[in-house]
Image (spheres, rainbow, N blue to C red):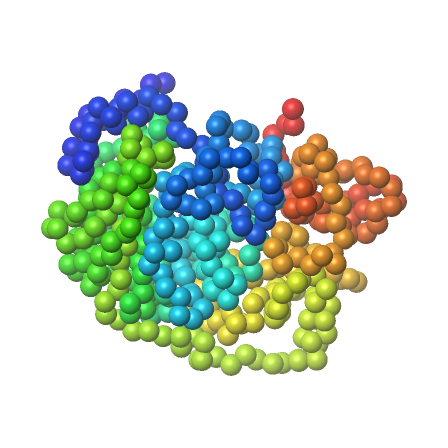
Amino acid sequence: MEHHLPQHTFGTAPSWDNTFFEEAHQQAPPVSIRLNPLKETQSFDSLARVPWCTRGRYLESRPVFTLDPLFHAGAYYVQEASSMFVAQAFEQHVKKQQALKVLDLCAAPGGKSTLLASLLEQDDLLISNEVIQTRASILVENMTRWGQMNTWVTNNDPKDFGRVAGFFDAILVDAPCSGSGLWRKDPKAIDEWSTENVQLCKERQQRILADVLPALKKEGILIYATCSYSVEENEQIVDWLIRDMGMESLPMQCDPDWGITETLSPEQKGLGYRFYPWKTRGEGFFLAVFKKQEGIVTDSLYHSVSKQKNNQKAELELHQKMRPYLNTDFEIFTHKELIYAINPVHMPYLEPMRNAFYIKKAGTAMGQILKDLVPEHDLAMSVHLSDAVSRIELSHEEALHYLKKESVKTADGYKGWQVATHQGLALGWGKWMPNRMNNYLPKHYRIRMDIP
Ligand code: SAM
């Protein structure tokens, strides 16, 4: 079915050109991925770089990503190139004095959260939040593949973040929007677009921002992004944030070769950055950066709760049992009989965060002790998985059968729990018996399509 672009809909957008806009929509969107710096392979060395993101790469054509074991291993995330500009905003404006606390408020499916995670150091903490439950589960899957211990996932409404006033050094609001910037990738969305919906989106964006801003500390950084071309959802929000919400607009340094359009808001109060597909190699995108001028700064979560040491001896023993699995410092806690490992510097946040939020994932889920450890998928995918853990390398074909949750025949000699790997990167657990293997890949991670 043909989808017709609304005529002159974005005429008020800065530097808009309807002819170029229509021409751009005759062409296929570029395909891009972003590499995981903590799960390196040489497979992508020859690809062209996304100019504004060190780890962004363009592909010549769109492969079936589901049939690439490296995708399942978390070696890369398939991400639209323009939205990788968030990396520039973060690197140019979020300055580190001490361990950072960063919130990605509208995080599912996890494109920008995996990007932010790659910009953080181990002691920094990323809270990736998604309000819609089913989408929060997909976010957990993608953050699990990415493999970092310092990324937690919550499933809360923006207004819940008022419970941690002045806590975050930086907040990303990649707002739900009318989505016109992605029409080339999703032409069906053209038919759902209307000026009324743009207005509703704008109001929702204001509500979301007003709800979450108390959680940003004084002088903290807000990154606001949409994939809409509408001035209402972009530059008008910039003016509102400055006029009514006490935010200061921050400029970005952009190389002229990148083709990004800097825009001035209608009240001439602040700056925004637009990606037009006829000028940049990516889809439609908008981003603006702000500093919070007033407010409080608190690390009070850190001091307010002392950790309960109920049974130190048992905890110590458990820690000893977990020690061989990870090559980094960690503390443990248990929840519903599952053992989790988290960075010791994040431990003081755990109880207060659990009281304030619905946490879907904190740190690395290690597994459950029955006779021995029955390991969790999260542990296999961890970038901190110790070299002492046995691994079994699978060919491309074997890896695909493993990912379909089939039993994989391998040479004799393997026994017990092994992490199945491809090109050295973990795919998940298997338990090898003398004449068969039990595949422990969680069902919802499995490939559902036929392998050609
Ligand atoms: N940041 C994501 C990424 O890069 O993968 C994409 C986020 S998408 C543009 C916007 C997200 O906001 C969606 O996951 C949607 O479920 C969520 N959302 C929808 N309504 C919301 C609301 N009222 N408050 C907060 N988030 C909302």
The one of 300 and 54 positioned closer to us in this rendering: 54
Residue 82 falls in which quadrant of the image?
top left
Residue in the picture at 17% in, 28% down: 8
Residue 452 falls in which quadrant of the image?
top right
Q: Which residue extends farthest top?
A: 1
Q: Whole-percent x and y of residue 357?
A: 44, 64
Q: Is residue 117 above or below residue 430?
A: below
The one of 60 and 297 positioned closer to us in this rendering: 60
Q: Which residue extends farthest left?
A: 267
Residue in the picture at 66% in, 57% down: 385
Q: Is residue 133 left or right of residue 266?
A: right
Q: Whole-percent x and y of residue 213?
A: 29, 62
Q: Whole-percent x and y of residue 104?
A: 40, 55
Q: Is residue 263 left or right of residue 313?
A: left
For the N terminus, the image quarter is: top left
Q: Is residue 104 visible?
A: yes
Q: Is residue 444 visible?
A: no
Residue in the picture at 70% in, 32% down: 397
Q: Is residue 66 above or below residue 1?
A: below
Q: Whole-percent x and y of residue 430?
A: 74, 47
Residue in the picture at 60% in, 43% down: 41
